[in-house]
Image: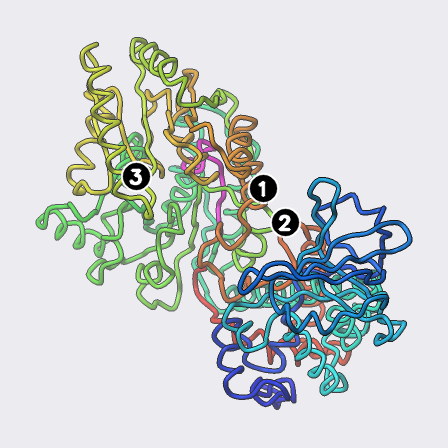
Amino acid sequence: MYSLSILDTKIEFLKGVGPKRSVLLNQELSIFSFSDLLTFFPFRYIDRTHFLKINQINNFDIDVQVIGIVKNINTIGVGRKKRLIVKFADDTGQVDLVFFKGVSWLLKSFLVNKKYLIFGRPSKYGNIISFVHPEIDIIDSRKATSFHSIYPVYHSTEKLTSVGLNSKGISELVKTLLQKCKNHIHENLSDTIIKKYHFLNRSFSFEEIHFASSYQKLKHAIKRFKYEELFFLQISLLKQKNIRQKKHKSFIFNKVGSRFNEFYFNYLQFELTSAQKRVVTEIRNDFLTGFQMNRLLQGDVGSGKTIVAILAILLANDNGFQSCLMAPTEILANQHFNSLKEFSDQLNLNVVLLTGRTPTNEKKIILKDLLNESIDIIVGTHALIQDNVVFSRLGLVIIDEQHKFGVAQRAKLWKNKEILPHVLVMTATPIPRTLAMTAYGDLDLSVIDELPPNRKKVLTTHHYFKDVKKVYSFIYQQLKQKRQVYVVYPLIEESKVLDYKNLMDGFENMKVIFEKKGFNVSMLHGKLSSEQKEMEMQNFLQKKSHLMVSTTVIEVGVNVSNASTMVIQNAEKFGLSQLHQLRGRVGRSSYQSYCILLTSNKLTNDSRKRIKAMVDTNDGFQIAETDLGLRGPGDILGTRQSGLINLKLSSLVKDYDLVELARKDAKLLLISDANLEHIDNRKIFKYFVNHYQKLLKWSTVS
């Protein structure tokens, strides 16, 4: 690592900070050093470059500034109710300036017939326009150049404001810092990149982003810093990927054998989609490299990820290796096990299931058979990562719904072996491309972006609670046609007690309405034991229950082909991706399926957008783009790569083009100069080592 620079100095040593303020800056804004303050960018700017005449004020939703003179000063009320009213005029009209605080001091500050500049948000009552507590400057005391300014606005907190560090106070600290350090700010991009994009130099860019001399230069400075953080992030991810690929050797599967061919030509009931074929080819190519595959397979609900997983398993088996398929729930593990059992006997494959409910004697036999290679495929839950589960020739690990398992948990499957199994992680939660290639840039990404041609789209409709009788009538029609129905209730931490009551009330209500008509109603929720959940799910699968009232425990992976209708109560309380996942529980057969979103009449703007997106499209990737726009990347990804995707300026949604450019440039750079040794890249290398390399812990599986 390179020696520390002045920018690494602790923030308490900046003039105007000191010990007390530094503690608050640490705690409230995570500002620990000069560098942290320098990169604590304004979140917006106030335009003080334009002036209005009083008769031009017609927008009461924006701040404006006016030059005029004080015509009259008056106070109204006494004590705490005392307020100051200043009549302020220019040659086109008059406004009131109203002050409730600091009345005595302000009374001495204003002079009649003196020229002032005011800045603030106007309001109108009747024909009177007023400004409450506007900012005020005496014209004579200001330099001519400071009339036309772009003011930075910084995030602050109540505690910081109490010690004088509101936005203005922080701005003063930044000004002090720039005066002290501007000659110590070094370039971190190559001359090639700077010339290519006509970037301003780094020191000048800091001056412009904090204290812009013009909007054009501010725009250039913002673009430079957005590119910079995206570029170094992409280098980090690509280096992580390159190191993993070179570091971790794996097995070569170069044989396409009898089991793969027999399944492909005799057991596939339909032609693979072009997307499925493309992904199988990508996986096959990974198997030929001699390095560990780490591939993320994204596919919308019902896109055929399981078939791709089966084909990968058969390739491993044809080359003499065992496979392991791990699912987050027993229900999902059972589904995968049953899918494999449909053809395993005919292909002479030994497939077993290992979960927390597997009897001890049976488990002992499984563990023994794993070691003597008589088991070809094992399907299971967290039970697979116990210390006593040891494979003799594990060649492929497939993980369904990868976000349910931690990195350390997954690595337990191969117990620190030198040659590692290939890894395929699958998710039915579509992630927008810009987000995926950044958040999962260290993985290879495969996408199944089309559904099988025989799939009918789930018809989605929105109804208010006043229409609930129509919805019940529709449910009855579906049940009469021997279809099954889900009715899902929200369960939110803040209102858990009330939500459980609504769930129970809903369950009793459904029983009253439908059991007298000859239909069985069941219930599934998180408070049930694993055994109870499994029993309720099996009853529903076997059509012993016709209508299931549930919480979101049915969100992931449950496959009941006869279920044709999903009713989501209080749909406005669910996130968009969660609504889409729930909708994916129906539409799993050739029957027409339906998703009904029931909401209250009072919807927030974001709720309306979520509901509209659900009604407008079934495309999970379009849903994901909308969700990203509404929630931002942090909420979608959770904690994944949280140390890396801490973007201060750039947005993975709004700056899509810049993300693409930065990734392309980073890729070309590392292809031509992997260790950043070229003289033109020394600045990049130095900055990367000091600011990014320390964040990365190269992992086997992301």
Q: Earlier in the sequence, mark 2 or mark 1?
A: 1
Q: CA distance from mark 2 to mark 1?
A: 8 Å
User: Residue 503: horizontal and vertical position, in percent?
Assistant: 26, 32
**Mark 3 belongs to which amino acid?**
Val
- Residue wearing tag 2: 653
Circle on res. 452: none
**Mark 1 belongs to which amino acid?**
Glu
Q: How many neighbours does mark 3 have within 10 angstroms: few (below 14), some (14-19), or many (20 or more)? A: some
- Residue wearing tag 1: 625
In the image: residue 426, left or right of residue 52: left
Q: CA distance from mark 1 to mark 3?
A: 25 Å
User: Residue 557: horizontal and vertical position, in percent?
Assistant: 35, 37
Q: Earlier in the sequence, mark 1 or mark 3?
A: 3
Mark 2 and mark 1 residues within 8 Å of each other at the beta carbon: yes
The C terminus lies in quadrant: bottom left
In the image: residue 686, left or right of residue 80: right
As rendered, which of 189 and 11 lies closer to the eye? 11
As rendered, which of 94 and 579 lies closer to the eye? 94
- Residue wearing tag 3: 553
Q: How many neighbours does mark 1 have within 10 angstroms: few (below 14), some (14-19), or many (20 or more)? A: some
Q: Earlier in the sequence, mark 3 or mark 2?
A: 3
